[in-house]
Amino acid sequence: MATRTCTTFSSLLLLFFLFSAANFAPVTSSDHTDEYLLSCQPFSHTTVEKQSHFRFYWHDIVSGPNPTAVTVAEAPGTNTSSTFFGMVVVIDNPLTIGPDANSKVVGRAQGLYASAGLKNVGLLMLENFVLTDGKYKGSTISIMGHNPIFSEVREMPIVGGSGLFRFARGYVQARTYSFNITKSHDAVVEYNVFVNHY
């Protein structure tokens, strides 16, 4: 009887050990896809999320000796397209506090826009608003979206940021303030930026 009890106890102990080992064994991956993960922990905010509203005037200067918007690529049919389909322009446009070109510059819009509409004029905008003034100096707001430039108001999403705008989200509304369609093709666009950040 004692031998039978001992055998039963040993069997139960072995089962318990196997069950525990199965439940607490580390999960490993044969392809080592997570070797670059340094840490993973719950994210908590120490401050309350807030929304800031900025207004900038975006100066797209394509004329003169010092343009801030330069065409870097075109498709074979861009010049005959009514929408300039396939044109890619790299920008480093000044952001000012007023619509006048001599207004205080508080940042730069750096990135590119591409004519992505085959039948209707529509730009794909990829730009960083790099702020250069005051407490926001060095911080950026990243924007990516569709810009139907002949619409009165165009809305594009904020997809991120850096510095004081780390983890940023929100949207911008763009309105054309002026556009010289006959001669210089320079444009001034009012950007209202609604950015949520911490």
Image: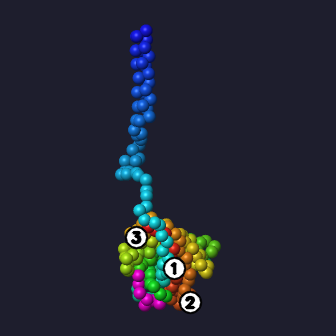
Question: Foreground residue, 23 or 106?
Answer: 23
Please tell me in which quadrant of the rendered image residue 12 appears: top left
Alpha carbon separation for disc pair 3 and 2: 41 Å
Residue reaching furthest to the top: 1
Label ID, residue 191? 1
In the rendered image, which quarter is residue 134 located in? bottom left
| Residue 115 in view here | no
The amino acid on which the numbered mark 3 sits, given as a three-letter code, is: Leu
Q: Which residue is mark 2?
A: 182
**Sequence order check: which comes first, mark 2 or mark 1?**
2
Residue underneath mark 3: 164
- Mark 3 vs 2, N-terminal side: 3
| Mark before the other along the chain sequence, 3 or 1 | 3
Task: Residue 87 in the image: state x and y as whole percent.
Answer: 52, 74
Q: Is residue 99 left or right of residue 17?
A: right
Position in image of residue 193 (x %, y %): 50, 76
Q: Residue at (40%, 51%) from the top-left corner?
A: 40
**Residue type beneath disc 1:** Tyr
Q: Quadrant of the C terminus?
A: bottom left
